[in-house]
Structures are given as structure tokens and as C-alpha cells.
Image (cartoon, grey):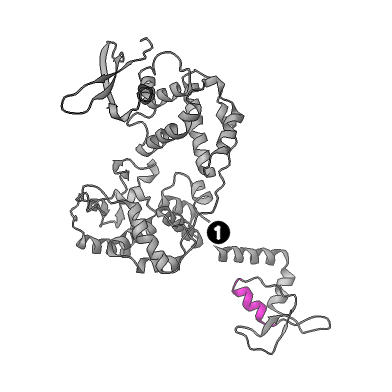
Amino acid sequence: MSRFQQGSLFKVKRKSSADVCVFRWYDYTTGERIYKKQIIGRTGQFRSRRDAEKAVVALRDLINVDVGTPRTVCDLEAHYRAHELAPGRKSFSTTENHRLLFKRYIEPQWGHFRLSAIRTVEVEEWLHSLPLAPASKAKLKCVLSVLYNHAIRYEWLTFNPISRVRTSQQRLRGKDVLAPDEFQKLVRNLSVRDRAMVLLIGSTGLRRSEMIALTWSDLNLRTMEVNVLRSCVRNRIGKTKTESSCRPVPLHPVVLSALFEWRKRSPYASDLDFLFPSIWHKGKKPLSPDSILEKSIRPAFAKEGIVGKRIGWHSFHHSLATNLRSLGVDIKVAQELLRHSSSCTTLDIYTRAVDQQKREASLKVMELMLPLEMRKLQHPSAPSKGRRRVTGVGKHMLRKGILVDLVGIEPTTSSMPCCGYSRKL
């Protein structure tokens, strides 16, 4: 086994450019001693040598990942990044998210702690003190727990203190979905390109990373399907989120028509070009979905007077799931269409009961529990002393799915729509 290295940091003078700070060490991974060095940055970037030393902390940990047992959280993190976040092991988005959470939150707070010094209650109090949403705190806890599970896998530890940390994943507000009439209003106020995007993602439930990675060759005109083969995150083409995501999705003729109309106007319309290319990058990269959301989608909502909803690209995914449920589509079919790995995900996260369905369900329960009372409302008997007569208004309201409190209702001579009754004050 190779020895523990501190490496060396020194300044290199250059004639044609600014001086640079260089870190050098020896690599023993191949069994031989190989001299290596890496430029850290220009000397003007660092106010003192201490600042330069801080810049090489993570690199120094990386060159010692195979030397003995990690002592601190920072050492363990370096080993985890070298072995688990290596290219090809995890998706680009997962790798970048882990790196960001390590750098921004975990390293500054816990990096210098010894592995055995981390306490469950201290981590729990630290998470509660962060100005983050509950879901973000839960994600941060999960990443820290994964780090300790990595140590257990290599038999450096026997217990994960993060596993007993309590965090809440309750949303601060529910996910906003689009009603069918709101979707219609949105489509009417969009350009040809943006209309094609919204129709495509609204009818198929594609993730935004999957939508912008599509090329014209992915459209199968014979089967009227779109093949989802890749995703694009931060202009990096990679694999889809899960294996279940790599499934063809059916396309409606209206959606195909909108896509063909856009293809006629697109300056990049060959089979290998992106469906929605970036003009700025001359079609070599897809456009930014966030810019379309800010410059086109949300202004179209504001123009139609739809306010109070936070609409993002994933809102179309939630809206499709809710509409499928309102139509009574089989849950397995909905799961396949939304390309979820489990039907539990489709039911618990991506669907919600529609108000009309809840009203109808409530009426059915009342008919089951109080059949006589419900029958009196639908077929009222002759009026008697101490009892008001209720005419066909009850039946009319039941058909509309509206639960009405009939206490205090009496005839009135004033003209009112639908019925001649008003509430007694």
C-alpha cells in the first residue's frame, strides 16, 4: 500500500502569461511511482498561501483515498467521489447534485469532524436550522446517509448515525396542475414552436430533459410514437432517468400535426437535428427549457388571467396523471404511459382526486349509509305539519353533485335562477 501524501504546492513563473500555482504529487495506482502535477489557478486569484492551501484540500484527499481508513468526513467524501461518482457510475445530474451538496453544506459544517464524532441529534438540529424547504433538507440528509453507508460497505464503520435523523418531507404547498380549460387557453397564446412543445409534453408526460434531447429521427410515423432514448441535462447528453423511461410514447395526430408545422419553419429540420434546437448554438445544442418557461409559457398564463399557480415543465406531467385518473384510466395503463417504475409512484405522488369525483363519492357513501333520507330528497312526500316540502330542487342539486344543507330553506316569491328557494336569514 502507498504512503500517505501531503503533496507540494509551489509557484511557477511564466513569461507569456500570469504566474500560476501548481500542486504536485506521486501516483501509485498502477503499481509504479508516477510524478503528476495540476495547475490550481493564477497566483492573483489567491490573496495568501493559506487560500491556495484551501483550494487543494479536496485534491489532497483524492490522492489519499486508497491509503488506510478515512479519518474525517472530508476523507470519506473524497473516497466516495473517487469510487461512486466516477464517470459512468451515476447519471450526470446525480453526480453534480452530490458534488454541490458536499461543497455547499456538508464540507463547511462536518468536513473536519472525525467519522465517529458525528451525533444524530446534532445533525438533526443542524438540518432544522437551515433556511431550506423540507424536501431539500430531506435530500441533504439522504446524501449524508449515503456517505455513511459507503463507509459501512467498506467495513470502516458498523453504524450509520444519519439513519435515525428525523426530517419532514411535507411540501410547503401542493403541486399545481392545469385544468383542461387552462391548458386550452395556454395553447391559444403560444407561437408555433412553443405550441408544439406544450402539446408534446402535455400529451405524453415527457420530462423536460427528455423532450429537449429528442431529434426528428426519434419520431416513428408508422406507429405514431416517439422513442425516448436519451436525456439532456445542462447541455450534456446522457441516459434517461430510469430504465422504465426508455419506452416509446404514443403521439396523437394533433400533436404530430403541430410538430410537422414547426418542422417546416425550423432552420434545422434534418433527421439528426434536435426537435427544438438552440439558434444561439447553431443547432448543435438544444434550447434552454427555462428560458422558454420564463419568456413564453408564464407570460401566456398571465395574459389569460390565470394567477396563483406556480407552473413549471413538470406541472404538465402532474396534470396528465390527474387527467388520466379523472377519466378512469386503468392505473397500470397510466403507469406505462407516464413511464414510472412503480404504480405506487403514479398513485401516491402524481395523481390527485378531482373535486367532482369527490362529490360523487360522497353522494354514494350517503346513499349507502342513509338510503331512506336520500330517497326522501329525490322523491318528496306530501307536506305535513311541522315539515317543509322540498320539491325537485333536491333531485336537481343531487344530479349536479352539490351537497346542500336543506335546513332553513323556504319558498320565496323573488325570482332566482334554477330554483325558487333562498336561504332564510
Please identify the quadrant where the N terminus is shown. top left
**Percent of width and height locating residue 259:** 27, 61
- Magenta span covers which residues? 391-401
Please identify the quadrant where the C terminus is shown. bottom right
- Kindly tell me whether residue 206 is visible in this rendering: yes
- 398 in the magenta segment: yes
Number of marks in the rendered image:
1
Look at 50% across and 27% down and name the residue there.
110
Query: In front here: 95 or 410?
Result: 95
Three-letter code for the amino acid on which mark 1 is drawn: Ala
What's the magenta bit mostly, secondary-structure-wise? helix
Query: In front here: 369 or 398?
Result: 398
**Percent of width and height locating residue 46:** 33, 28
Mark 1 surroundings within 10 Å by alpha-carbon count, few (fewer than 14), some (14 through 19), many (20 or more): few
- 388 in the magenta segment: no
Q: Is residue 292 left or right of residue 75?
A: left
Q: Is residue 19 left or right of residue 177?
A: left
- Kindly tell me whether residue 158 is visible in this rendering: no
Residue at the right extreme, as displayed: 385
Q: Which residue is mark 1?
A: 353
The secondary element bearing badge 1 is classed as loop
Q: Is residue 195 left or right of residue 325?
A: left
**Percent of width and height locating residue 93:** 37, 39
Q: Is residue 229 above or below residue 361?
A: above
Q: Is residue 384 above or below residue 303?
A: below
Residue at the front extreme, as displayed: 47
**Percent of width and height locating residue 215:** 25, 51
Look at 37% across and 56% down and name the residue there.
204
Look at 37% across and 60% down and name the residue there.
297
Look at 58% across and 38% down and name the residue there.
128
Q: Is residue 377 above or below residue 106?
A: below
